[in-house]
């Protein structure tokens, strides 16, 4: 692997590797500075990716599922970007600021201290790796768990490279000089500064995403793969900036739970829908209508896009943004859902227990996840006011709590008298 | 647990419960091909007990097979004390001038957060409190009031 790896997607409007005229020998191609593209509100959806060896931007997109490496500088003409976005789905994408990436070589024994010093002097993050990665002199370090926090115990590579990220506009050389000074270096270490345009990092990583069988006969398949079993229940997902590819234990827990409880004709609400994976899976399992809610607007477009990938009829999945002021985003005509699923986090689950269970009809089923095993007691306590028959399933340190909605909700902690009122 | 080959050590600061694939998390971890979504979910879940917007220090150990583990540390005691006393910076004249005031309840709350740290887990709450009070004294912050 090349020493310097920049993962970039050419199709993403504001993502590029720009080098100052001083060189990094591994980067071929023109080193002239390109004008920075204006931050655009468009993002080409992930299905368009270009190979890394292009020299000029071509209007035919080569689709690849392997991560692209920018070993050469990529040119991107604004006009062709517009062409790309006009034929594609528009996501609401908030452009983030560029960052500066500084690669500093340093011997292992001071790399640690230097990293801490850089963080105090303004680096947003630092990482240390072997300078000789990929070369014969590569040094192998093994660890049985996360590297311990206390500096003295860390075993680092003899020739280390520290990659520090700074916000654009910060004076990197000054920060580096102060950091080097504070650890006692007599001279500035060698370093190279690059401007790191905001890549679509999630897409890079998600390109490792393969079809996965979550439970018997239920597969989550990335958009660019063929379902391994055409006859099984296949949910096609395009990974993107929204949460939910099916790989996380909580998604698996919720999918398995849904697989066991969803009956044909059910109406379901997915609170914290992300990519829409749970709603779409439920629709494919036989549910007739799904409503999704999320605080992130990207989830809306992501879920709707994923719904279209699965050939669902329009309006079977409707997604709403939960506003910041906490009002209920779901229209009043949607109530009495048969199944409620919420895969979010402990705090919103506990705070919104009333609202989440309120969507459910009496006797309907509610499942919540996104919680660690140690957080289960708190969730059980909050939800026992509203649910009977609470059960918990576990996967790899994560848990899913589910139960049946009570007929009468108690307002105080008295023993339940509501069973006979359930229809 | 079998030892795995380490490919990189990454250190960054993320607000509790607010990890997203955007910078600073995105570039810092994405460069090493780590699963961003998994990290964000894991980190957010583990920091639910902390008020959001508290900057947490994270050290991620990335392995060659693109898996990773991470350790989360809460911010420094002085950060908490400054926030509790409403100060921008510590006092310039500790011992002589009082720069700010905190209550014992503040100390207790800070100690509870610190106890979750990997370094302090084996320490009794009382000694954590004492060390926080020592830090407060060195910053010119007084502890006043009754513990209710």
Image: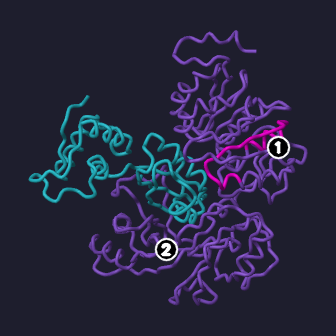
Chain colours: A purple, B cyan
Part of the protein shown in magenta: A278-300
Secondary structure under the numbered disc 2 in the rendered image? strand
B42 up-or-down from A205: above or below: above
Task: Give A104 or A365, whichever is nearer the viewer.
Answer: A365
Q: Which quadrant does the C terminus of chain B fall into?
A: top left
Q: Determine the CA span between mark 1 and mark 2.
A: 45 Å
Tell me the chain of label 1. Answer: A
Specify few, some or many for label 2: CA neighbours under 10 Å numbering under 14, 14-19, or 20 or more.
many
Q: Quarter of the image holding residue A75?
A: bottom right
Identify residue for label 2. Answer: A101
Identify residue for label 1. Answer: A316
**Where in the figure is residue A60, as x and y percent of width and height?**
82, 77
Mark found first going from the N terminus, 1 or 2: 2
**Where in the figure is residue B33, as x and y percent of width and height?**
60, 62
Q: Quarter of the image holding residue A265?
A: top right
Residue drawn at 29 percent across, 49 percent down: B77
| Residue A393 belongs to magenta span | no
Taking B37 as reference, is A183 left or right?
A: left
Task: Give A248 or A110, whichever is nearer the viewer.
Answer: A248
């Amino acid at each position: 692997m090349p020493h310097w790896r920049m993962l970039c997607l050419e199709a993403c409007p504001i993502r590029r590797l720009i080098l100052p005229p001083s060189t990094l020998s591994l980067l071929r191609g023109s080193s002239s500075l390109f004008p920075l593209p204006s931050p655009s509100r468009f993002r080409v959806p992930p299905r368009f990716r270009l190979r890394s060896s292009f020299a000029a931007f071509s209007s035919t997109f080569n689709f690849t599922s392997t991560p692209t490496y920018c070993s050469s500088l990529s040119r991107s003409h604004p006009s062709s970007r517009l062409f790309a976005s006009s034929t594609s789905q528009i996501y609401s994408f908030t452009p983030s600021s560029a960052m500066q990436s500084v690669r500093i070589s340093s011997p292992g024994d001071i790399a640690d201290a230097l990293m801490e010093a850089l963080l105090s002097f303004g680096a947003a993050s630092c990482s240390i790796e072997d300078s000789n990665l990929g070369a014969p002199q590569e040094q192998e370090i093994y660890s049985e768990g996360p590297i311990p926090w206390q500096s003295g115990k860390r075993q680092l590579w003899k020739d280390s490279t520290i990659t520090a990220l700074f916000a654009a506009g910060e004076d990197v050389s000054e920060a580096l000089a102060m950091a080097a000074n504070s650890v006692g270096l007599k001279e500035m270490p060698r370093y190279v500064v690059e401007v790191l345009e905001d890549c679509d990092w999630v897409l890079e990583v998600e390109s490792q995403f393969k079809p996965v069988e979550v439970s018997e006969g239920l597969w989550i398949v990335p958009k660019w793969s063929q379902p391994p079993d055409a006859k099984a229940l296949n949910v096609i997902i395009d990974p993107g900036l929204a949460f939910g590819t099916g790989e996380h234990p909580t998604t698996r827990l919720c999918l398995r739970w849904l697989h066991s409880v969803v009956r044909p004709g059910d109406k379901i609400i997915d609170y914290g829908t992300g990519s829409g994976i749970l709603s779409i899976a439920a629709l494919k399992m036989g549910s007739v209508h799904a409503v999704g809610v999320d605080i992130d607007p990207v989830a809306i477009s992501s879920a709707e896009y994923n719904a279209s990938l699965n050939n669902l009829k329009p309006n079977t999945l409707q997604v709403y943004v939960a506003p910041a002021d906490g009002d209920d985003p779901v229209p009043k005509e949607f109530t009495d859902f048969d199944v409620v699923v919420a895969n979010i986090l402990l705090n919103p689950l506990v705070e919104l227990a009333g609202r989440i269970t309120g969507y459910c009809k009496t006797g309907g089923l509610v499942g919540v996840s996104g919680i660690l095993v140690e957080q289960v007691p708190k969730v059980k306590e909050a939800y026992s006011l509203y649910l009977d028959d609470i059960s918990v399933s576990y996967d790899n340190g994560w848990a899913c709590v589910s139960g049946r909605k009570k007929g009468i909700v108690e307002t105080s902690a008295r023993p339940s008298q509501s069973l006979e009122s359930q229809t | 647990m079998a030892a795995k080959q380490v490919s990189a050590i990454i250190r960054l600061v993320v607000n509790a419960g607010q990890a997203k694939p955007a910078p600073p998390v995105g570039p810092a971890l994405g460069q090493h091909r780590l699963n961003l979504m998994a990290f964000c979910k894991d980190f957010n879940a583990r920091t639910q007990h902390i008020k959001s917007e508290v900057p947490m220090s994270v050290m991620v150990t990335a392995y060659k097979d693109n898996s990773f583990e991470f350790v989360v540390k809460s911010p420094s005691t002085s950060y908490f004390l400054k926030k509790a006393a409403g100060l921008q910076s510590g006092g310039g004249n500790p011992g002589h001038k009082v720069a700010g005031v905190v209550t014992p309840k503040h100390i207790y709350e800070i100690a509870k957060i610190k106890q979750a740290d990997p370094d302090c887990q084996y320490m009794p709450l009382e000694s954590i409190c004492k060390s926080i009070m020592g830090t407060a004294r060195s910053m010119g912050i007084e502890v006043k009031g009754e513990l209710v």
